[in-house]
Image (tube, grey):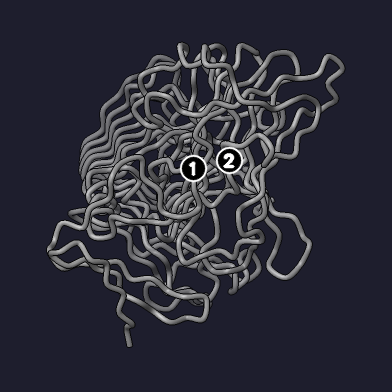
Amino acid sequence: MFAAQNYDMFVTGSCGIRIVGSARPSFRGTRISSLKAGVLLDNDVGHVYFYDCMLSGLIGVYCRRNSGDYYFEGCDITGAFCGVLFGVKSYANHNGGFGAQLNRVHMGFSPYSIYQAIDDADVYGSASTVIGLSCIFNTVQHEQIGEAAIKLLPKSESKMRVTGGFGLSWSLHTYSSPRQGWQFALPDSLMPADKRQQYAAWFGILRDSDIPRGSVTGNLRLSSAPGALGSTRIEKLATTSDLDGLTPDYTTVVTKEPYVEINLNAGTLYRDRTNRVFNPVGRGNLLQNPENPASYKVTGGRLSAASPGTLASLGGAVRDELGSSPVILQFTPSSQAASPCLIQILLAKAPYAAPAVPLSLSLWTYTDSLSGINVKLNATDAGTTVNRIFYNQTVYPKGAWSKITGVDGTPINGTVAFQMVSIELPRDRPTFLAGLMVSEGPVASYSPRYHIAADDDIELVRPGDGLVLTSPGGKRYRLTVDDQGQINLAPLT
């Protein structure tokens, strides 16, 4: 039951304060401990307030009925198992969750600060999603954490705002009885030693969240335990948010919706812009001639260059990115189109070994169909034929030009060999495509060529600079021009 996060793992016990019905109390300086739950939030109207309270027990606060608008200020919330526990019980047209604002609150000195359990198996089994955290955390500190600061269910959907950081510190990752010092890990019978402190936070679906860098008390961070895997695990990232406080370099994102990036904030935008300034020339399109219909393997229809009249439908965003007259491809499904309608294009140097940076994918597409367009980056495990799929993004243009992007989602350790891009298309209406590109690093400016390409002059502005060329045999030569216009080629050592 513990592994399934089932509430039935807890024995029956008492609570210090149970709030029910239409009660809307406020508590000041209240201290509760040595019970199953210090406080049981079970009322119909929410609006319960706690000031400078110390709430503890096996569970500090159990929110059984999430009626929202709970407020905690200057409190200590802890427990032998967790500080805050909430479930999935259905109330007021939503399933479970915890809707609260916490201001200057200390948590921790326990296995978990915040924990979600299945307290209604029927609801959790039938619901596509349940509510997770709908919270504002202002300088909430998670100290001496034994297992995780936040442990939510995989089907939970959370929206959060965090200011001031997490104040995270890990307890010793070993367990002994009696406990020695600040030792808050779970017993070996519940949590094997090689599974402890895998992540500081476990989220299901995370959307519309603002979790910036913890400028006051720090970010979530990786444990030093032998089984540690990262700072955060997110089952699905649903919107682009500022998640710098989760330490993105150590965050595992299992799936993402189209367009979503792991974090987008002023700091990362500045870093990306700086990288582009100091590395202004990057490799071009890794695909094999993506503007030529003959480059594609086509199933269930015909791929051709679109008529010039198609340009009239282009929006300003497409023209801004691809130019005033981009090449547009048109896929026309056959009258007896099989399922699926599919086009595939190889990478120019397939199999393409993963570089030390992720690969990004981008594509503009249009259709009047109500069906979706799905794009995948296909690969195999290096040296094998085991198939891997990356990005797997789907959009529903429904009569408008839409952009599909894939970012941050490919390995950078050489474990896969990239092969092709596969695009599944609607069977009932034509589809138009433009600007298909796979590139190294962040989504790059569109280029139809594998090599560096430009649609205008290229100028080296510093007098005397030249181009360095490498022969097939590996010899390097420098190409320059003198004041009389004579081209000079000199070998380089």
Horizontal side of 427 relative to 159 (left or right) equals right
Horizontal side of 22 relative to 167 (left or right) equals right
At label 2, which amino acid type do we have?
Pro
Q: Residue at x 25, y 50 (%)?
A: 273
Give the number of the disc on residue 290.
Answer: 2
For label 1, the SS is: loop
Q: Nearer the viewer, residue 71 or 298?
A: 298
Horizontal side of 306 relative to 125 (left or right) equals left
Residue 158 placed where, x, y %? 45, 35
Q: Residue at x 81, y 18 (%)?
A: 334
Horizontal side of 249 relative to 306 (left or right) equals left
**Residue 102 occupies which quadrant of the picture?**
top left
Between disc 2 and disc 1, whose residue precedes? Answer: 2
Q: Nearer the viewer, residue 42 or 196?
A: 196
At label 1, which amino acid type do we have?
Pro
Residue 401 placed where, x, y %? 49, 19
The relative height of residue 172 versus residue 118 in the rendered view (above or below) is below
Residue beneath disc 1? 448
Label 2 crowd (10 A; few <14 / some 14-19 / many >=20): many
For label 2, the SS is: loop
- Which part of the image, by quadrant, shows the C terminus? bottom left
